């Protein structure tokens, strides 16, 4: 294209700075939100009003803010479960299955101590055991694709997706009619944790926020400063070169998937075990599994950077909780939050291009 | 028993058509892991159009057209922009999953049209899927455009210097591939189970994707795999008909997914890959730059 | 189609003429007003070093790249190629250096692919008869239904030539036609192209090395240097020395200085080693040898004869099926690669970009590939960023890697600079054993010299060096002992100084009777 003696050209980027990446990421989110505005328009709602409602509910309203924070913690954990394999060039889309596994394991501990019927359980022992079980449950679920990838090079996308469905139905089996975890109401829900097993809030937030923040710092440190972080990144950037440098591919894929799965398991415990008003595996647990896919989007926009995931998790936590709210208030159709998920993802895919290329303005040369 | 097999073959039809679409794309070197997304679009749009116009034909045409559009989108991302095909496919899937949940919600419920005619319970689309498999096999291995398509998937730079337009071939393949996925989705929503429900596919597209690896990129092997999985799917839905009172019905529902994982593991073993591994299109998943 | 033109062409007619071909890339003029013409029935070699503009010129003639300036005339008519298809239609055929064939398809499918006159539904029978006729004419023996990946390099080249001829090519452009051929295959090729000139085809080989080949068959030579034509000669008037001087622009020394070092004790001992490749075929069978301190042990052979699996097995990147490998007397057959690096093996892989470096990592992080497991640079699992950066800067200065900073990504380095970086990374660990797999492949004269001198320096310092090379001159000049390798076996082990080129050449082509084995 030529404009007044200048030529616009595409150029492959040799490198890009952190600032450039941040600007592009923000731009992608803005463009996606702009497009979602058309969905509001089509539904007869002024987009500005729609967003104002969403943001004021998510970040100001006294009911909305805790919900946003709970979701942000959940999303952050799901994002880490995705990021860790992502930095090693592997795809974990099994956060849903891993978080169901974590939740089932945690509730399994409570069940084993008789918490389903007997409210007098030793919380000092049971609570820590529940957390450990959630980590172990999710970790075991992550171990499956990790082992299969490391041992047989099995496609991890299909395996993790299949495990999502498998665990979805296993959860149904556990909580629905006749299942061992069935709640007393008989409404297809899990049993409710008794009061001693309901951890109190810390400054209005579930204590799991410390896990999320601690993991942020830990992952940041591991990726940038440690030997194992270097091995993971090298394997992600070039598996052949990493193998040549002495990195053990089996070790890497097992490690990133097991730890990723464990983090997702923790996310499952967080939502079903520490959030006020829940303390059970609800009937609509599938929604939380779907919410976990936002972890993919966060991870991709953050370019695998754990610190950058925090604001994104808060933003998407707010958008999803606010989205559900305006749906009712403005009589929008069901699933505006799902539509937002879809549009964000596809815009993000389109923006990949700008991470690799840049437009440059060049003065036309004399022929 | 006949009824069980009829239901199985009807289910296999959907796997076959969707996976044939994926085979065409992968043979041209473009992997689309978002089969489920394209199918959801085809199913939802096909369902809405058929329900509002009362015409099955328009419903199917709309489903096929929207599938082709999704294919076009995937081709644009993967061929023109040259992005990571896995990321693009995940984008297609999540877009389909999210947007169709929103678009289709007001239409939740049964289609409300008279059922399409069947031959002793067997859907006419089963015969269509057989014809498609045979036709695609003939196209791929016996025609010049088919040879070009396979070459583009094996080694695009070779195809280019042989005078094949790589970009055009890939666009056409991926659009056709998307159209078939959309068709598969509309068969599901208009014929197999004409009731719209949020995220009703529950993994059919991902199983179709796994079937492609299983098929060694050959339409006839795929047909066998689809029928096997169609039967598995039926067992999981109605276990009482074959094996009553073993597991709860929920555990039976995990069955097709567990088998998929087991099949994937078998296919990944050295034994299997040393015999069949060469069938994988060599340039699969790699963007082509001149 | 070109075939119909045959009758009108007479020997010596100008088929193709290029005038003032110019192509500029940012910061360089790849082709600078190049003129030449190609006549029917002649072999017209185009000579030039890497970077002289040969590739660009070839791509322009075949329609892959469009020139900025200049005109091309075919049969006196001005033409404008938009794609290879245009060039093919006008009777230009190209045989690429890296084979442009679909490995998974049959010979016949490859020949038919993209043919402008092929019917929609492929008529394999008719095509087979036609191609078989061409095979008879040029004495090619090929099974047209074989998959291409089963074929040898020479056979693949035959398929490419057949493909071009079947499309009616009157001009055959051959890119480095002899580079991956064993000597008998080269002989066969030269015979064939001479038959072709009798049919009034024009053959245009583009050549960097192998000057004797040029001299033996061509009638005319055009020499390129830095994008310009610097000489047009009749081959009768040319000598090897003259051509080399025109190519390089200065006198060229044909002999490397040998370094004589006292041979020490054995560092690497390999006993009856067998290795399988990824297709499950035996790629290395029953190989035994040793490499000593201060010795360069050369493995000569055409690529694909098991050198790569052998190197990978020694580096621990591929399993040894049978046999033993000892380093300094200790068995290492089953050790992981990392353990081998720690014990003093250094491996320079042939794939610089895919294996030897990580393109998206900075130069510092690339150097770190050989340091991250060292506790001096990585205490208790935490990387000492300052120390490794200092080390990287030091090495980059020492090895003369041209780069603005150590933060540059490795993918932005040129081939020569990247190889220097890899060399710096590997050699700075002072390995006892260096495995150098095609270390000078694709490098220009300067970088080649640098790499060879570094290997000689390491030899002087007492390292044992295993040199794998396709370049017979290089192996002969550097090695103390030479093992020609053919189809996974050593064809003998010869003393380097006395080894005769002809004997090594014959052995690496699998011809045994000439050799007196040791």
Image (cartoon, rainbow, N blue to C red):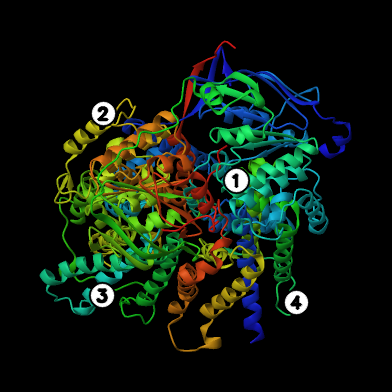
Q: Mark 2, residues whose alpha carbon is within 10 Å: few (<14), some, or many (≥20)?
A: few
**Disc 4 marks which residue?**
B119
**Disc 3 marks which residue?**
A108
Residue at the limit of the structure toward the right, as seen here: C7
Please state which of residues A240 and C469 is positioned toward the viewer in this rendering: C469
Q: Position of residue C455 (x, y in %)?
A: 32, 40
Chain that bears disc 1: C
In the structure shown, which secondary structural element does the residue marked by tag 1 occupy?
loop
Can you tell which quarter of the image residue B56 is in?
Answer: bottom right
Q: Position of residue B118 (x, y in %)?
A: 73, 74
Q: Nearer the viewer, mark 3 or mark 2?
A: 2
The residue under the point 47% across, 23% down is: A360
Can you tell which quarter of the image residue B223 is in?
Answer: bottom right
Q: Answer above or below: position of C23 versus C303.
A: above
- State the separation of the CA atoms marked 1 and 3: 61 Å
Chain that bears disc 4: B
Q: Are marks 1 and 4 on the same chain?
A: no
Q: Which mark is residue C99?
A: 1
- State the separation of the CA atoms marked 3 and 2: 61 Å
Q: Which mark is residue C397?
A: 2
Left or right: A280 in relation to C19: left
- State the separation of the CA atoms marked 2 and 1: 38 Å
Q: Mark 1, residues whose alpha carbon is within 10 Å: few (<14), some, or many (≥20)?
A: some
Chain that bears disc 3: A
Q: Are marks 1 and 3 on the same chain?
A: no
């Amino acid at each position: 294209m030529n404009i007044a003696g200048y030529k616009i050209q595409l150029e492959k980027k040799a490198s890009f700075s952190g600032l450039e990446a941040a600007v592009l990421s923000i731009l992608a989110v803005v463009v996606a939100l702009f497009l979602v505005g058309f969905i509001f328009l089509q539904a007869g709602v002024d987009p500005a009003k729609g967003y104002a409602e969403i943001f004021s509910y998510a970040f100001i309203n006294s009911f909305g803010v805790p919900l946003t924070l709970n979701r942000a913690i959940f999303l952050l954990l799901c994002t880490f479960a995705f990021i860790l394999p992502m930095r090693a060039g592997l795809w974990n889309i099994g956060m849903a299955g891993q978080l169901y596994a974590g939740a089932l394991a945690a509730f399994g501990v409570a069940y084993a101590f008789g918490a389903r019927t007997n409210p007098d359980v030793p919380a000092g022992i049971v609570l820590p055991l529940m957390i450990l079980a959630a980590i172990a449950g999710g970790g075991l679920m992550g171990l499956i694709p990790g082992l299969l990838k490391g041992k047989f090079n099995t496609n991890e996308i299909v395996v993790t997706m299949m495990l999502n469905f498998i665990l979805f139905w296993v959860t149904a089996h556990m909580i629905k009619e006749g299942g061992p975890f069935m709640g007393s109401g008989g409404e297809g829900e899990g049993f409710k944790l008794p009061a001693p097993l309901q951890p109190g809030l810390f400054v209005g937030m579930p204590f799991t926020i410390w896990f999320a923040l601690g993991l942020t710092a830990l992952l940041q440190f591991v990726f940038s400063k440690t030997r194992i972080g270097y091995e993971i990144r090298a394997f992600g950037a070039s598996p052949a070169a990493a193998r040549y440098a002495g990195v053990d591919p089996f070790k890497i894929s097992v490690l990133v998937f097991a730890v990723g799965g464990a983090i997702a398991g923790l996310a499952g415990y967080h939502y079903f075990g520490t959030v006020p008003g829940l303390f059970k595996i609800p009937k609509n647990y599938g929604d939380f599994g779907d919410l976990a896919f936002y972890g993919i989007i966060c991870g991709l926009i953050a370019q695998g950077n754990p610190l950058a995931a925090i604001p994104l998790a808060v933003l998407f936590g707010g958008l999803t909780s606010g989205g559900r709210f305006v749906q009712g208030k403005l009589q929008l159709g069901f699933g505006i939050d799902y539509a937002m998920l879809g549009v964000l993802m596809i815009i993000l895919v389109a923006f990949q291009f700008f991470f690799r290329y840049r437009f440059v303005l060049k003065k036309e040369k004399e022929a | 028993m006949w009824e069980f097999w009829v239901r199985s073959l009807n289910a296999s039809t959907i796997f076959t058509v969707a996976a044939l679409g994926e085979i065409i794309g992968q043979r041209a070197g473009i992997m689309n892991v978002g089969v489920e997304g394209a199918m959801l679009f085809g199913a939802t749009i096909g369902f809405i159009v058929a329900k509002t116009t009362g015409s099955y034909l328009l419903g199917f045409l709309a489903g096929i057209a929207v599938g082709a559009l999704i294919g076009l989108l995937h081709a644009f991302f993967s061929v023109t922009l040259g992005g990571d095909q896995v990321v693009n496919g995940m984008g297609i899937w999540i877009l389909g999953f999210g947007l169709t949940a929103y678009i289709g919600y007001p239409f939740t419920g049964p289609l409300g049209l008279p059922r399409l005619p069947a031959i002793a319970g067997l859907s006419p689309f089963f015969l269509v899927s057989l014809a498609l498999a045979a036709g695609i096999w003939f196209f791929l291995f016996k025609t010049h455009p088919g040879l070009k398509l396979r070459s583009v998937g094996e080694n695009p730079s070779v195809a280019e210097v042989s005078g094949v337009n790589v970009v055009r071939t890939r666009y056409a393949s991926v659009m056709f591939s998307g159209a078939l996925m959309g068709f598969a989705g509309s068969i599901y929503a208009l014929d197999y189970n004409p009731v719209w429900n949020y995220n009703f596919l529950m993994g059919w597209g991902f199983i179709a994707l796994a079937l492609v690896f299983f098929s060694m990129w050959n339409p006839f092997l795929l047909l066998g795999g689809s029928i096997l999985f169609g039967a598995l799917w039926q067992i999981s839905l109605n276990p009482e008909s074959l094996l009553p009172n073993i597991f709860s019905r929920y555990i039976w529902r995990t069955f097709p997914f567990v088998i998929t994982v087991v099949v994937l593991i078998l296919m990944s073993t050295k034994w299997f890959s040393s015999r069949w591994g060469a069938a994988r299109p060599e340039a699969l998943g790699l963007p082509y730059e001149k | 189609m070109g075939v119909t033109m045959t009758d009108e062409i007479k020997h010596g007619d100008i088929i193709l003429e290029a005038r003032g071909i110019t192509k500029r890339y940012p910061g360089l003029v790849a082709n600078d007003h190049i003129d030449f013409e190609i006549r029917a029935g002649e072999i017209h070699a185009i000579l030039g070093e890497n970077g002289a503009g040969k590739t660009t010129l070839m791509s322009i003639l075949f329609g892959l790249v469009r020139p900025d300036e200049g005109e091309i005339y075919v049969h006196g008519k001005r033409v404008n190629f938009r794609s290879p298809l245009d060039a093919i239609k006008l009777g230009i055929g190209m045989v690429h250096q890296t084979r442009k064939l679909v490995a998974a398809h049959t010979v016949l499918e490859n020949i038919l692919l993209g043919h402008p006159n092929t019917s929609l539904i492929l008529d394999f029978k008719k095509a087979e008869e036609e191609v078989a006729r061409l095979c008879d004419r040029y004495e090619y023996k090929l099974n047209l239904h074989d998959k291409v990946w089963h074929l040898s390099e020479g056979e693949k080249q035959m398929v490419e030539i057949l493909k071009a001829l079947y499309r009616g090519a009157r001009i055959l452009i051959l890119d480095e036609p002899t580079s991956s051929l064993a000597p008998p295959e080269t002989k066969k090729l030269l015979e064939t192209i001479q038959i072709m000139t009798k049919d009034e085809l024009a053959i245009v080989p583009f050549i960097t090395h192998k000057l004797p080949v040029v001299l033996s068959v061509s009638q005319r030579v055009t020499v390129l240097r830095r994008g310009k034509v610097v000489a047009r000669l009749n081959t009768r008037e040319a000598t090897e020395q003259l051509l080399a001087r025109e190519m390089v622009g200065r006198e060229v020394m044909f002999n490397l200085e040998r370094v004589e070092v006292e041979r020490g004790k054995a560092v690497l001992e390999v006993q009856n080693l067998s290795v399988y490749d990824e297709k499950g075929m035996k790629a290395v069978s029953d190989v035994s040898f040793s490499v000593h301190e201060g010795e360069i042990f050369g493995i000569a052979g055409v690529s694909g004869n098991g050198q790569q699996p052998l190197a990978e097995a020694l580096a621990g990147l591929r399993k040894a099926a049978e046999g033993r490998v000892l380093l300094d007397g200790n068995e290492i057959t089953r050790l992981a690669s990392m353990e081998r690096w720690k014990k003093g093996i250094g491996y320079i892989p042939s794939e610089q970009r895919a294996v030897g470096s990580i393109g998206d990592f900075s130069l510092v992080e690339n150097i770190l590939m050989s340091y991250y497991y060292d506790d001096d640079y990585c205490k208790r699992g935490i990387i000492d960023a300052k120390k490794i950066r200092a080390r990287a800067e030091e090495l980059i200065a020492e090895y003369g890697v041209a780069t603005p900073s150590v933060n540059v990504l490795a993918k932005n380095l040129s081939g020569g600079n990247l190889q220097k970086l890899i060399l710096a990374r590997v050699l700075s660990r002072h390995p006892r054993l260096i495995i150098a797999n095609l270390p000078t492949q694709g490098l220009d004269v300067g970088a080649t010299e640098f790499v060879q001198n570094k290997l000689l320096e390491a030899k002087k310092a007492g390292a044992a060096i295993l040199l794998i090379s396709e370049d017979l001159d290089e192996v002969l000049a550097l090695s103390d002992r030479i093992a020609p390798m053919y189809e996974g076996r050593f064809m003998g082990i010869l003393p380097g100084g006395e080894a005769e080129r002809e004997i090594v050449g014959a052995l690496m082509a699998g011809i045994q009777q000439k050799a007196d084995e040791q």
